[in-house]
């Protein structure tokens, strides 16, 4: 979907459908067909209540009149919600070009929200369907405003495009996206955007001493891949190097600790954290953002093959730590442990890891918030604020020495799964905390937000959660380090 900005009136554009929002206790903008639309509102067919839609025609165009509710409550998230609803209604009307009349006196965040909500709702994953199955004619979004909004539209279009590509990666079945294919995709994307890509195969991973990561891969005949993407933006020499670390278990059967069959088909989504990292780095490069970022993605399958790691096995991580594997389905933390060590050894000064790590976080937070755990209050505050601003919400859970003691091993230094069935998301984070040490680090458990969120602008498929968030974290980190002008 193409998104463009204009200062033309909606009725001067070539849009076949125009979306107009109306706030409670406000009328229709004076430069629009106010009498016709006010008559629709006065009749009750159209309403100002949030999410209420009505359709009419004027000046040879279809008009979708959208209730925006209370102006004081209208923010970027509400813009995404109403934009998704409008796109759905416009698509039913066979719209090719939709023009949003940007509500007067709103910020750039709302403009971005309109782009994001439209593009996310317009997304289709149909590569395995016949090409003549219900083709969607929707092609273009125009944002009409009295002032120039081209920059927020440009940024939003790039970032949401990356998010939709991350959704594609999540939705592709595991037979078509083994670790080697994901690494190949990342390398091609890097070449396109001027990103330096380094791909390490299973042999190289073992040679580096990544015993925890390698152990998870040994049950599959598909070799693991460590994907490294380096992007140093223009003027970013003074910015701290940010490490974005993603879990990409391209299929997670649970290994010998086999998952229940009923939901195992969803385990193609266990690579969504890695997909988000790949596409966030690509978006930053496309934006030419003045940031220094290293994306690290650990890609592997977790299968119960004849060489699979066994419960009770002890492995040695890259930093020398020994880990007792009590459950082979607690595999993501082992992959991330070595990736964190690698990122630190390669000079990263801030860390964010993102993973579909624990079912417990879904029980705790549902599908509204992702879990956030951190060893640094200031860094946690920054990351959490970026979540609020992007609409990818985070809820901080505590770390504590008592939780850290729970992941101490009986036969090794650590265990990958405590025997006590409590604080499961936190104890998983405490294992990662051991490897992050004192470097400012944030762990994002996205098991509840990576798919099946079912908001009005996003459905049951992969969400691409984390792309908008990580782009904002990187940009804010760089901005906070910039000298005042």
Image (spheres, helix red, strand yellow):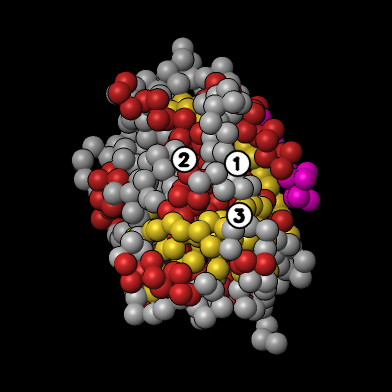
In front: mark 1 or mark 3? 3
Which mark is first along the chain, 3 or 1? 3
x and y percentages locating residue 93 in the rendered image: 50, 46
Which mark is first along the chain, 2 or 1? 1
In front: mark 1 or mark 2? 1
Quadrant containing the C terminus is bottom right
Which one is nearer the viewer's eye here, 393 or 236? 393
**Residues at marks 1 and 2, CA–CA distance in whole angstroms:** 23 Å
Magenta segment range? 190-201
Q: Which residue is mark 3?
A: 16
Crowd class of label 2 (few under 14; some 14 to 19; many from 20; radius 10 Å): many
x and y percentages locating residue 66 in the rendered image: 42, 63
- Which element carries disc 3, helix, strand or loop? loop
Q: Which residue is mark 1?
A: 137
Q: Residue at x 54, y 35 (%)?
A: 125
x and y percentages locating residue 285 in the rendered image: 71, 56
Which one is nearer the viewer's eye here, 121 or 96? 96
Residue 39 visible to an observer of this rendering: yes
Q: Which residue is mark 2?
A: 462
In front: mark 2 or mark 3? 3
Query: Mark 3 and mark 2 in contact (Cβ < 8 Å)?
Result: no
Q: Residue at x 33, y 27 (%)?
A: 263
Q: Is residue 37 left or right of residue 217?
A: left
Which one is nearer the viewer's eye here, 198 or 120? 120
For residue 174, which numbered disc appears in the image?
none
Residue 193 located within the stretch drawn in magenta: yes
x and y percentages locating residue 346 in the rendered image: 66, 52
- Which element carries disc 2, helix, strand or loop? loop
């Amino acid at each position: 979907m193409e998104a463009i900005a204009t200062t033309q009136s909606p009725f001067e554009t070539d849009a076949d459908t125009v979306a107009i929002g109306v706030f409670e206790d406000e009328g229709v903008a004076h430069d629009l067909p106010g009498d016709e639309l006010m008559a629709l509102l006065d009749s009750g067919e159209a309403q100002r209540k949030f999410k209420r839609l009505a359709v009419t025609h004027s000046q040879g165009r279809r008009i979708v009149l959208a209730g925006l509710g209370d102006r004081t409550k209208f923010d970027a998230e509400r813009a995404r919600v109403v934009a998704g609803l409008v796109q759905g209604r416009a698509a039913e009307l066979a719209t090719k070009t939709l023009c949003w009349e940007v509500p007067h006196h709103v910020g750039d965040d709302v403009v971005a929200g309109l782009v994001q909500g439209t593009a996310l709702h317009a997304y289709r994953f149909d590569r395995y369907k016949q090409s003549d199955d219900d083709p969607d004619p929707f092609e273009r979004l125009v944002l009409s405003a009295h002032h120039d909004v081209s920059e927020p539209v440009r940024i939003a279009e790039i970032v949401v495009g990356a998010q939709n590509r991350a959704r594609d990666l999540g939705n592709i079945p595991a037979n078509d996206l083994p670790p080697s294919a994901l690494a190949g995709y990342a390398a091609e994307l890097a070449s396109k955007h001027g990103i330096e890509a380094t791909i390490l195969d299973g042999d190289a991973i073992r040679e580096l001493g990544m015993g925890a990561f390698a152990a998870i891969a040994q049950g599959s005949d598909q070799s693991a891949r460590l994907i490294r993407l380096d992007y140093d933006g223009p003027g970013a020499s003074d910015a701290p190097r940010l490490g974005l670390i993603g879990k990409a278990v391209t299929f997670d059967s649970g290994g010998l600790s086999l998952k229940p069959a009923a939901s195992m088909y969803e385990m193609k989504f266990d690579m969504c954290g890695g997909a988000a990292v790949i596409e966030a780095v690509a978006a930053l490069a496309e934006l030419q953002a003045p940031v220094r970022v290293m994306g690290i993605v650990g890609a592997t399958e977790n299968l119960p093959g004849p060489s699979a790691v066994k419960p009770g096995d002890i492995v040695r991580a890259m930093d020398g730590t020994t880990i007792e594997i009590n459950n082979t389905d607690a595999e993501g933390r082992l992959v991330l442990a070595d990736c964190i060590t690698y990122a630190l050894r390669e000079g990263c000064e801030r860390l964010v890891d993102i993973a579909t790590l624990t079912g417990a976080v879904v029980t705790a937070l549902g599908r509204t918030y992702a879990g956030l755990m951190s060893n640094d209050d200031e860094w946690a505050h920054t990351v959490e604020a970026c979540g609020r601003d992007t609409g990818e919400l985070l809820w901080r859970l505590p770390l504590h020495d008592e939780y850290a003691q729970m992941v101490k091993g009986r036969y090794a230094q650590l265990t990958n799964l405590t025997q006590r069935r409590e604080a499961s998301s936190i104890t998983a984070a405490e294992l990662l905390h051991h490897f992050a040490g004192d470097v400012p680090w944030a762990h994002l458990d996205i098991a509840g937000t990576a798919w099946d969120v079912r908001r009005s602008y996003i459905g049951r498929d992969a969400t691409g959660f984390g792309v908008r968030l990580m782009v904002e974290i990187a940009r804010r980190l760089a901005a906070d380090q910039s000298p005042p002008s």
